Amino acid sequence: MSGDPILCVDRLSMRFGGIVAVNDLSFDAERRKITALIGPNGAGKTTVFNCITGFYKPTSGAIGLTHDDGRAIRLERLNDFRIAKLAKVARTFQNIRLFPGMTALENLMVAQHNALMRASGLTFLGLIGAPSWHHAEQAAIDLARIWLDRIGLLDRADDAAGNLPYGDQRRLEIARAMCTQPALLCLDEPAAGLNARESAALSELLLSIRADQGTSILLIEHDMSVVMQISDHVVVMDHGIKIAEGTPRQIRDDPKVIAAYLGADEEEAIAVMESGT
Amino acid sequence: MGRSVSAPPAAQTSRAPGAAFILKKALISAFVALVLFSLMIGVRTEAGPQGQLVYWTRFDDLAVMVAAVFGGSILVELLRRWWGPVDAVRVVPPSVQSALSLAGRLVAPALLVFTFLVPVLFYNERYILDLAILVLTYVMLGWGLNVVVGLAGLLDLGYVAFYAVGAYSYALLATNFGLSFWICLPLAGILAAFWGVLLGFPVLRLRGDYLAIVTLAFGEIIRLVLINWQTLTGGPNGVTGIPRPTLFGIPLTPADDGLAALLGIEFSPTHRIVFLFYIILALALLTNWVTIRLRRLPLGRAWEALREDEVACRALGINTTTTKLTAFATGALFGGLAGAFFATRQGFISPESFTFHESALVLAIVVLGGMGSQLGVALAALTMIGGFELFRGLDQYRMLVFGMAMVLLMIWRPRGLVGHRAPTVFLKHSQAISSDLVKEGHG
Amino acid sequence: MDYFAQQLINGLVLGSIYGLIAIGYTMVYGIVGMINFAHGDIFMIGGFIALITFLILVSFGLTAIPLILLVVLLVSMAITALYGWTVERIAYRPLRHSFRLAPMLSAIGMSFVLTNYSQVAQGARVKPVPPIITGGYTLHEGSEGFVVQLSNIQIIVVVTTIVLLALFTWLVSSTRLGRDMRACEQDQTMASLLGVDVDRTISMTFVIGAALAAVAGMMYLLYYGLVDFFMGFVAGIKAFTAAVLGGIGSLPGAMLGGLLIGLIETLWSAYFSVEYKDVAAFSILIVVLIFLPTGLLGRPEVEKV
């Protein structure tokens, strides 16, 4: 594959005891593009995500991230919070993980932790109330305000995140990830549980993130209308291996993909074939 | 929270229990009480003159106790009938709610003004002044532990260890090197914070009850070392002759260079008590100020985020290790400062003052306060320590009543006196967040 | 070598007592997910009831030691079990679905209540009893006159522990109650939907745990020849340490942890210093948890992302 990949997954494998969740998987995600990772349930998609974002240490293989300035980072060598902090990879979770007892605004402020930590002089400048800290704090609030506005939650900024409706929580989680100003945004089933209207709004939000922020997006999704509508490139997994990749159109017509979905779940196969027109 | 399907207790299924039901329940309670108390109260054992155990019966006491349980059971059942189901949600009308929140906003300043005036109002009542100092010490300890438990959501059952480290740091530095209180105070705090980090390291990966036992074990280790390292700590006898604090080097003594002599007023021991009162008040307010300030800084927000969801924190690039360690260190720092104050106030310390009971008491203050609420912790400290003093007359039954009060308070208010969380930043207006949404942390 | 063998025997006996108490902690933790801080005091109450029953039986002129022991065992198990039941009913059940810390503090409060109750009801002084079971066997006579002894009481403690453990394992694995308990451990809501009486099962857990603690209390009385109102605290913390060391929620883990804590304590006292035996036990707990955050036999916590 040609072009300018931001993320190169190279022969990634992940085993849990005797179970091989991901087997020798390789794919690239293009810079400033939306790459979708699809496949039937249990195909190993979330495991791939967890390897990329450092929650699992891959059994073997390499995950390379190249920043806009050419700085290359081997993600499998970083762990834990460092991937988000140093490599600028942000993620959302399949089952939403907001801070439910904190307000929407506070959620977005926590996301700017590392920048604010520097600005507060590792807390000490902030404790004495240095003016530079106040400026940084105001800037952080402004950034949060912009994102709240973009996801249409400006009016609910001061409500507890746990009190927001489900669809709003999904969008807030994306906004929170964006507040870390990531180079790569990984979304784990962002459209799960959304109705058609909300899904459409989500598609628009993701397209605008790609266009305005230039953020590369990697996305796991079951909602084929979203995948077909916004993806630039689709990677299909089944049983831990890649079975196909290509443009949405190529994928839709690929008999291997249909067979995989048919084998897994009839309803999903029908959804694949009927959606994305 | 795991408020899943909860089967209502049997007593509540039947809306209005009839007289027969109440009587049956009371009879069962009385029977259970009879079995429970039969040997423990009905028979009294004691070592006789030759070391041989003897026993005698106390059937009258037993009868009284069983009758009390029978009557108590009827009373509780009647009260329950009158009050309705315990966990029924009582809808508070918005007008009352806003009035309550206004009153809530006034409570803190009023309490603060009153506290400042305590030495003036009760100048001649030594007992009240001593009690006020005690309450303030626990307010400070509560606020310190609140950082760890209330904000960061890390369970700490060995908080007393840092209190002890602070107290012994000051006592040993002052008695061995003659350093003054004001130099030792920050040193005691720093040493305690250091121990906080030391405890923090092994518990970083631990969760919940594993964390509970390790912190508890840590507290016990510190206490046992204090008892057994006789050459350094004086063992069970403790450290005596700990110097009192001075006011910019001027001692508060009847001596010629004492404060009273310098001011040309008559010496009174109350001066020192009042001085100590304002020291602990200042220390407590410092703790409060720093905590409130920290909550609005990224560090404090990270603590609360950690309590809410550790995995999400990591996904946002927050170093959970340093975040946890700073929480332990900050909490320990305040504990150490309080400990140094305790040592200078008592003039004598021994390991006996630093038992698990103290840790449990401070934890109870934090939880009863409503996790994370500064005002709640202050009110809880006042309730617990003040209440405990009220029961002083009960003498040997004091811990019994205290323990029962703890059980009842928890059943009455599992989430504490102040059951909501105040946001640290807002765009338009600050709305209190119901405690049902706020997590308790995994640790 | 002889000295070591003797300490090993002593350690195993002490460990058996800790193990019996630890099972109560681990059972309750497994099923309701809370630390029953009052469990150490239940053990103490068990010791007291055994003592009082024993005194009464002796004063009635009973002399057949095996019969006395059997009656004492049954009475203390029954009454102590009722204590366990009552504690759960009063202090824990109202907080069943509450926040995590509330039941824990309620338990700490209950522990204060039980300690103070015994102090008030039976006085603060230590209650000594003369040795009830005497005699034993000399296993090995060393060259320097040091003898390795196994006393009858030590045999009784270990045998009782093994029998109870076997009985208990059978109960959990092969009876209706055991199945209900395991079901509640997995998912209380689901268990209740499938017709398991969750309240009753939890009550029974407390009853069984308290009965085992009563046996431990009686063994302690026989072995050390004394009880006092404060013994529940120290023994409770040790047993809790044992349960966590073995991996809380795991029954074999509790027994293993108990034996280990007993051995560490005894051997440390024998070879290093008596004063620091508890420090040694707690330090080893901390070290083990650094490397195995869920104890020796605990299930590792899989973090679901």
Image (cartoon, coloured by chain):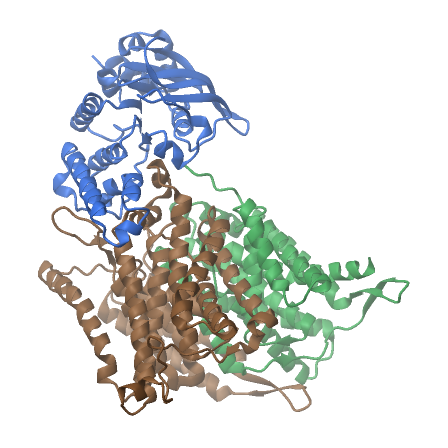
Chain colours: A blue, B brown, C green
Front in this rendered view, residue B27 or B200 = B200
The furthest residue to the right: C143
What residue do we see at 28% from left, 50% from top?
Answer: A125
Judge whether A84 appears above or below B401 on screen.
Answer: above
Residue C228 location in percent, x, y?
Answer: 58, 76
What residue do we see at 47% from left, 67% from top?
Answer: B169
| Residue B100 visible here | yes
Judge whether C119 appears above or below A120 on screen.
Answer: below
For residue B385, which quarter of the picture? Answer: bottom left
* Side of C148 relative to B307 (left or right): right
Residue C166 location in percent, x, y?
Answer: 65, 53
Judge whether B115 appears above or below B101 on screen.
Answer: below
Residue A31 location in percent, x, y?
Answer: 29, 18
Front in this rendered view, residue C239 or C160 = C239
Quarter of the figure that contains the C terminus of chain A: top left
What residue do we see at 40% from left, 78% from top?
Answer: B345
Judge whether C40 appears above or below A232 on screen.
Answer: below
What residue do we see at 25% from left, 51% from top?
Answer: B296
